[in-house]
Image (cartoon, rainbow, N blue to C red):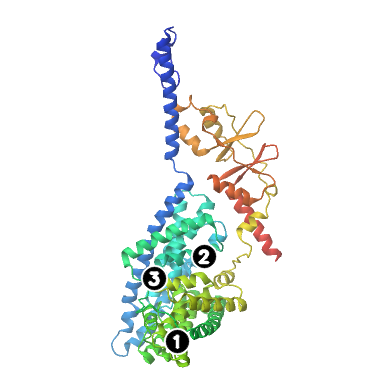
Amino acid sequence: MGTQGGGTPDVTVAIEHDSASPVRTWLERTQSLLRSLRLRSLSAQMRLVLSERQLLFALTIALGAVCGLAAVAFHLTIRLLGHLFIERAMAAQGHAWIGWTIATPAAGGLMAGALLSYLVPNAAGSGVPQVKAAYASLSGRIRLRDSVGKFLISSFQIGTGASLGREGPTVHICSGLASTLGRFFGISQNNLRRLLPVGAAAGIAAAFNAPIAAVTFTIEEVVGHLDGTVLSGVIIAAALSAVVERSVLGEEPVFRVPQGHTLHDAQSLLVCAALGVVAAGVSIAFTESLLGVRARFKRLERIPRWIHPAVGGTVTGILAVVAFLLFRIDGVTGGGYATLGSALAGKLAFKTLVVLCVFKLIATVASYGTGGAGGIFAPTLFIGGMLGGAAGFVDRMLFHHPVESLGAFALIGMGAVFSGIIRAPVTSVLIIIEMTGGYGLILPLMIANMSAYVIARHFRPVPIYEALLAQDGIHMRRENMGDALKHVALGDIAVFERPIVSFKPAMGAGDLVQRSALPANQSVFPVLNDEDRLVGIITVDDLVILASDPHLAPLVNAVDIMRPAVSVRVQDHLLKAVETMEANGLHEVPISDENGHVVGMLKEAEVAHACMVHLRLAGSSN
């Protein structure tokens, strides 16, 4: 005596031959109920298995917290190493401080150069260009080794006095964490790429304590256009990262402005416009100098490459000594946030502001151009703050405004130079507002920032990050990925020759699992009717659940678990295929002809390959 229905006892078969209709009816209802319960159990099990979209959302939340902690750890490590090295060197007794102040950044550059040359060469530079390249390449891959190297080398080099910032490296570190976690959990290549902006936004939010500016910077600089599929994750990660950062370091903005800065006199707007023009000139000078020095040191072979950053450290140390001898103030080394805070409070003299602006520009060009590992965000803000503070003295001389206006112009100068160098005009306004907690300067900020942005872009169309990538042989295409996907038709891709494993609606679970094991390397299986027309799809996740419970085999057919039919047509372009995959959470989609017959299968990897081939051909034709 056997079992029937896969779960009813042997006695059921014996009694079923009895003609007692009430008992038979009761048993049939029981069997029907058992079948219903088992199908409901199957549905529950399928819901317990996270879809990739749900996993992506969970990772986004996790990354907000993880990246916030990583950014805080990076910040505190730089602060600790700064106390141990450059601050102790400048506080040495007698005249010894001069030698130590020059030697400490040089030694830090020497150590960083050795590590970058022989262990982690990809950790050099700011980190933002690397993230842009990884996102644009559709790979979404940043090695954890490079992120860890960036953390250690950047913190050490900045802590020993290099004129570099922590913000760019934070973007690289957090994007590397996002890429690593995505690969660990088996996220598809397309969605892995989407995790990079999530990590970047979380890093910027924690580094600047500015979640809104982090969102706009990620969209403006990393993504390059407003992508709705990325925006929600970027917002969530930035907000959570800022919460983590504030819970550890406090809710105070990065700069404590003594009073709410405003400009009540419309005459000052003329000075703001002029400040934007000067800021554009300073931005171009900074960009050209940095790229020129970097190109020269890349060609320099007489001095070993691992010694190059020590040259930049030596230049920075000498400038720091001269600035301290002249004004008894620091700011040339590191990010210079403390000195910048003094400028925002209107405590620095005109000559001090001008000299520090020039010295910081030279020190940053030397530190970065010789191959250091650090960012240009903080130095950019410092240069702009000094320039803006000097413009404030001009405003006072012309219109006799109160001394409080000096800090206001320092803020405006920060945004204007940032806009001219980084080329993120919206972020340049929001980041100043969030970093200082003041909203009274929106109009003059917009005037100065847009003036600097437009002029700098006119005379130097290629932004600094793209120019840095071009020096490394990586050329960013003006055509974005969405446009590239529109230009490639599915019929132009060779995806129609490999065999396709398909199912019939009446196939049982055992046949489904057995047939899916055929060597076709599919993750989505079309369900075809008797006329070979597509009526539904079954994913490999559905089959894994079936295989995990042998009791379901006699109860389930393909028609019971198949999803609604999803496909693209031969004449569609790649963008339509990508949108279809995204909307349905699939890594693969059937391709059908005009009669509804499946003629091929398209994978995400094939989309990425076809897109890159198109961009490469477009670049060579240009």
Q: Report the amino acid beneath label 3.
A: Ser
Nearest the eye: 285 or 333: 285
- Spatial CA span between label 2 and label 3: 18 Å
Contact? badges 2 and 3 (CB < 8 Å)? no
Q: Which residue is mark 3?
A: 155
- Spatial CA span between label 3 and label 1: 34 Å
Q: Does residue 162 appear anywhere in the picture?
A: yes
Location of the C terminus (image quadrant):
bottom right
Contact? badges 2 and 1 (CB < 8 Å)? no
The mark that comes first in sequence, 3 or 1, is 3
Look at 43% across and 20% down and name the residue there: 31
Q: Which residue is mark 1?
A: 392
Q: Does residue 310 appear anywhere in the picture?
A: no
Q: Report the amino acid beneath label 2.
A: Gln
Q: Give the image location of residue 110, x and y in percent.
A: 43, 76
Label 1: few (<14), some (14–19) or many (≥20) C-alpha neighbours in 10 Å: many
Q: Give the image location of residue 613, x and y in percent.
A: 65, 56
Q: Is residue 442 left or right of residue 581?
A: left
Secondary structure beneath dot 2 equals helix
Contact? badges 3 and 1 (CB < 8 Å)? no
Q: Report the amino acid beneath label 1.
A: Gly
Location of the N terminus (image quadrant):
top left
Secondary structure beneath dot 3 equals helix
Q: On residue 130, which mark appears? A: 2
Displayed quadrant of residue 292? bottom right
Q: Give the image location of residue 324, x and y in percent.
A: 37, 88
The mark that comes first in sequence, 2 or 1, is 2
